[in-house]
Image (cartoon, grey):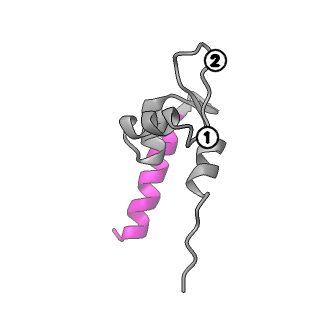
Amino acid sequence: MNELQCIIDLLTSVDEKMKLGHIEKKFLTIPEAGIYTGLSDSTLHKLTSKRKIKHYKPTGKNIYFLKSDLNNWLLSNPVEPE
């Protein structure tokens, strides 16, 4: 299996874990966002406490992320090839 196929399989696996029944989750918890982005829970907590990544705290305690916000953040600093 080549590297590209491994990456595709990993993304497919993560995508399947993010689905709830047949309805895809739009909001992710810290552990789910960690799986989705590949970042540790502690890194995500640091980013939220420093207000470096968009997040939601409806009750003032639990942290949630919109998948679209995570995608935008992940793609926010592109490095162009030479």
Tell me where residue 39 appears, x and y as whole percent. Answer: 41, 45
Tell me where residue 46 appears, x and y as whole percent. Answer: 43, 37
Instruction: Give the alpha-carbon distance from disc 1 to disc 2, as whole Å.
Output: 16 Å
Q: Which region is colored magenta?
A: 1-18
| Label 2 SS | loop
The reply to whether the magenta stretch includes residue 7 is: yes
**Which is nearer the N-term, disc 1 or disc 2?**
2
C-beta proximity under 8 Å, tags 1 and 2: no
| Label 1 SS | helix
Q: How crowded is mark 2: few (under 14 residues within 10 Å), some or many (20 or more)?
A: few
Horizontal side of residue 49 vs 60, given as left or right: left
User: Can residue 39 be seen?
Assistant: yes
Q: What residue type is labelled 1?
A: Lys
Residue under numbered circle 2: 58
Residue under numbered circle 1: 67
What kind of secondary structure does the magenta stretch mostly adopt? Answer: helix
Relative to 10, residue 56 above or below: above
Tell me where residue 52 appears, x and y as whole percent. Answer: 55, 43
The reply to whether the magenta stretch includes residue 6 is: yes
